[in-house]
Image (cartoon, rainbow, N blue to C red):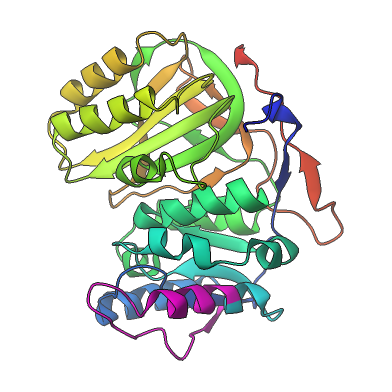
Amino acid sequence: MKDEKPWLRTSVRPPRLRPGDTVGIAAPASPFDEEAFARGVRVLEDMGYRIHLPEDLFTRCGYFAGHDRRRAAQLLALFQNPNIKGIFCARGGYGCLRILPLLDYDLIRCCPKVFVGFSDITALHAALYHCCRLVTFHGPVVTSLGRIPPGACDALAAFLSGGKAQHLAFQNPRVIRAGSASGVVLGGNLAVLCSLAGTPFSPDLSGAILFLEDVHEKPYRIDRMLTQMRLAGCFQNLAGLVLGVFRDCGDMDAICTIVKDVFSTLEIPILAGLPAGHGEDNRTLALGLAARLDTASATLSYARAATRRPDEKVLEPAAKPGGKD
């Protein structure tokens, strides 16, 4: 049963990363290109982090990076290891959905730490917030780090290591419905979120600002996924909607028209043009953290820093969603 007062939930911000900290690499989904992986590891090292590679990281099992239980155990071991301060995902692809029932969320809840990835990693973002209220980071996977521009790398570091609230600016913003709203930012890849609908890990989006992005999906498939989620009640009491990059998904005007139609009964601000998702300039978002969406200034502004100092409280009340400000 969904909470009657979702703003009474708590968000768990992980401790911020510092230069010299050790970060672990997980492969919870598909196997990956080792050359692209090596370039990404060098970027992490240039950011000042030490790298821990699990022994079974390069395992292949068909289109998975190892059997389901092995991938789940690998991820849990990284959360449990006190010497590892953050976790980056090697690649998305497919496979995270299969390991969701195999994770020990009580263990993860006791060991909050920075967790970064996107695309298929959306399933883990959703589960870690739903089951642990952990603030996670929708950002580059290791195999994409070597090709993101310096600005995107700096933005990633600011989220993970900085002590200030971050403000994201839209590029060539498209206002689908004007307004402003506050709420916890949730979401990620549309296809993955659609696959979660009806499962125990589907995120409760009541009072949330929903972020969506995708790749290689034709407009009619985007329509179908959004319509399915609407019919399943996923968008009830949504506070706002943000569209990121929809690469190779057809004309963006057509996608905006679909979104306007599907969300026509909701009086919420909707803004497209956030440079996040399957594009080279993949800017990082904090998921599970309160922010304010403003279509007039074309910004998504977080209420506070996404990571905490070691002496700060672990549990903090999430901001009460205000709908239209």
Decide whether residue 161 is among the magenta residues.
no
Q: Residue at x 25, y 76 (%)?
A: 33
Rendered position, 218 above or below 306: above
Q: Which residue lies furthest to the bottom in this view?
A: 55
16 with respect to 226 (left or right): right
Q: What quarter of the picture does the N terminus occupy?
A: top right
Rendered position, 291 above or below 257: below
Q: Which residue is drawn at 42% across and 72% down?
A: 43
Rendered position, 38 above or below 245: below
The image position of residue 215, as x and y in percent, is 22, 46
Q: What quarter of the picture does the C terminus occupy?
A: top right
Q: Is residue 139 visible?
A: no
Rendered position, 230 above or below 314: above
Q: Which residue is drawn at 56% across and 66% down?
A: 103
Which of the 4 image quadrants contains residue 149?
Answer: bottom left
Q: Residue at x 41, y 19 (%)?
A: 270
300 with respect to 192 (left or right): right
What residue span does the magenta drawing correspond to? 49-76
Decide whether residue 51 is among the magenta residues.
yes
The image position of residue 82, as x and y in percent, is 72, 78
320 with respect to 277 (left or right): right
Q: How many numbered circles does the render carry?
A: 0
The image position of residue 320, as x and y in percent, is 71, 24
Q: Nearer the viewer, residue 174 or 136?
A: 136
Q: Nearer the viewer, residue 258 or 162?
A: 258
